[in-house]
Amino acid sequence: MFQILEPCGSYSFLIENNYTGKKQIVSVTPALYHLYDDLEIFTDRPEACPFFRKNPLDSLYYCTIHLTRPDVCQEYGCWRFLICDSLGNRAGRVMQSRHLHADSPHLRQIWNMYVSILHEADDDTWDRKMCEIVQKAGFEIRS
C-alpha cells in the first residue's frame, strides 16, 4: 500500500500511498529502530508494508511508525488484506488474526459459509485458499 520515496534524515521517510498518491513524512519510533533494521519479515511476506515488523522475542507484529502513521492506517488498523466489491468499494478487511471486519453483508455470508471453516495452520496456504474463495464470489483482494 505504501512505498518509500526517499529518506528524510535519521529513520524518517517520505512515503506515498500507492492507491491515493498522497505523500507524507513518517518517522520510525526510536524504541523500534532495532525492529525496523530487521528485514526478516520480507522473506515470508515480501508484500508487507515497509514499516511492519515481527519481533522475534515475543512473536508479535509492530508498526514501527505507529506514532506518525498515515491516516489510512489509523482508520483501517492492521490488516492482512483489503477486500473490495466489483465497483472498488471496501467490502471488508482481513485482520492479522484471520478475523474479518465486514462492511458487506454478502461478504460476511461468504466468509461464514466457506472461509470460517478453513483450518490450515500455514498462513500462506490459508491466505491462498481464502483469496480463492473470496475472488470466486466476485470480490477483489488487495494486500
Image: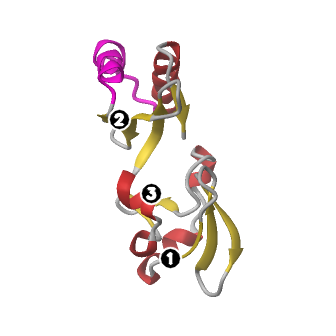
Q: Is residue 121 magenta?
A: yes
For this orientation, the residue located farthest to the bottom is 9
**Foreground residue among 108 and 46:** 108
The amino acid beneath tag 3 is Val
* Mark 3 or mark 2, whichever is nearer to me: 3
Q: Which residue is mark 1?
A: 28
From the viewer's perspective, is residue 107 above or below residue 68?
A: above
| Picture disc at residue 98 | 2
Taking the spot 45% from the left edge, 23% from the top edge, the residue there is 130
Upstream in sequence: badge 3 or badge 1: 1
**Foreground residue among 71 and 8:** 71
Tell me the magenta residue range.
104-123
From the viewer's perspective, is residue 116 above or below residue 76?
A: above
- SS of the residue under disc 3: helix
Q: Main secondary structure of the magenta part?
A: helix
For this orientation, the residue located farthest to the front is 87
Q: Within 10 angstroms of label 1, few (less than 14), some, or many (20 or more) residues? A: many
The amino acid beneath tag 1 is Val
Determine the image quadrant of residue 105.
top left
Is 37 displayed left or right of 115 in the figure? Answer: right
Determine the image quadrant of residue 102.
top left
